[in-house]
Image (cartoon, rainbow, N blue to C red):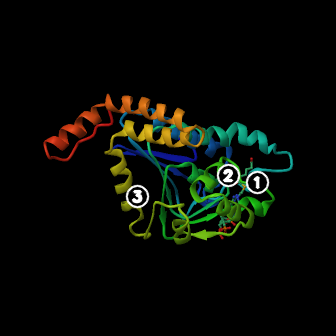
Amino acid sequence: MFETAIYEVRGETAWITLNRPDKLNAFTAQLNKDVASAVRTAARESSVRAIVITGAGRAFCSGQDLGDVDENTDYSDVLRKLYNPMVMEIEKCEKPIVAAVNGVAAGAGMSLALACDFRILSEKASFLQAFIHVGLVPDAGNLYYLPRLVGHAKALELAVLGEKIGADEAFRIGLATKVVTVDQFFDETSAFADRLAAMPTKAIGLIKRNLKASWESGIEQFLDRDAQSQRIASLTGDHKEGVQAFLEKRKAVFKGI
Ligand code: T3D
């Protein structure tokens, strides 16, 4: 279906695997387009209720393929035409997206992981703000998401010093939901994604939307948003099922509707 990414639906979870392992899944224009298109496909498929993005081989993603750029490359154009639309597909998606960071996430590969809602890290995972080592500025939303996750001071430190951080340090500073062993990585990620897929999907979408909006609105405006969102959530089948299950003292079966 895609040239440089694999798209598979397992149960109600769509798995998107960046598939250029020889180059540590570095981004080419095709890979940018494939990731964007795969996320859009998963967002539209009604049977999909959670999305996992991971990398083939030993890396998550090593950022821009440095063999694909030269002195004639207009980086701004590349970002506007390729990276930004890819990040916006993730940003607009109302379904939960998990970055399953199997190895190094460098440069725009780190940006990709940051744009996701959750990061499950293999103990072999690492993050590297590689941009500074090639005289560039973190891009593809990197400096938008990073301070929101770790705070301004730590974001500045990571971006300017460009030191690679391992999985435990990433967890310590708030970049990871959890760190799991290599042996357990696939099973733990699957279980986590499947757990999300079995939750009230519409409410998750509203939580994502509201948390993002909270950075840009005043309290009065935000309280109104709360009221609007709760109206939408209260009209879902999952809300009715949750209440019914509570009253009947049984486990709720949410359908994402
Ligand atoms: O176009 C625009 O708008 C610009 C956008 C820029 C966004 C960015 O992402 S800038 C940052 C680009 N990325 C980097 O600078 C990272 C470069 N890679 C590395 O620093 C290291 O490879 C890693 C720290 C990621 C991993 O190190 P290590 O020692 O585990 O692996 P390695 O031996 O360096 O790499 C293995 C192979 O992958 C190697 O190829 P070879 O020698 O076996 O044929 C290496 O050249 C290749 N590779 C790794 N990263 C990239 C890459 N090839 C092309 N581009 C890469 N980014």
Residue 249 vertical position relative to residue 172 in the rendered view, above or below: above
Residue 28, percent across and down? 67, 48
Q: Mark 2 — residue?
A: 143
Q: Measuring 50% from the left and 61% from the top, which residue is drawn there?
A: 176
The CA distance from mark 1 to mark 3 is: 31 Å
Q: Is residue 162 visible?
A: yes
The CA distance from mark 1 to mark 2 is: 9 Å
Q: Is residue 235 left or right of residue 229?
A: left
- Dot 1 or dot 2: first in sequence order is 1
**Marks 2 and 3: in contact by CB < 8 Å?**
no
Q: Measuring 27% from the left and 31% from the top, which residue is drawn there?
A: 237
Q: Residue furthest front?
A: 220
Q: Is residue 138 left or right of residue 245?
A: right
Q: Mark 1 — residue?
A: 137
Residue 219, percent across and down? 53, 38
Q: Secondary structure at mark 2?
A: helix
**Marks 2 and 1: in contact by CB < 8 Å?**
yes
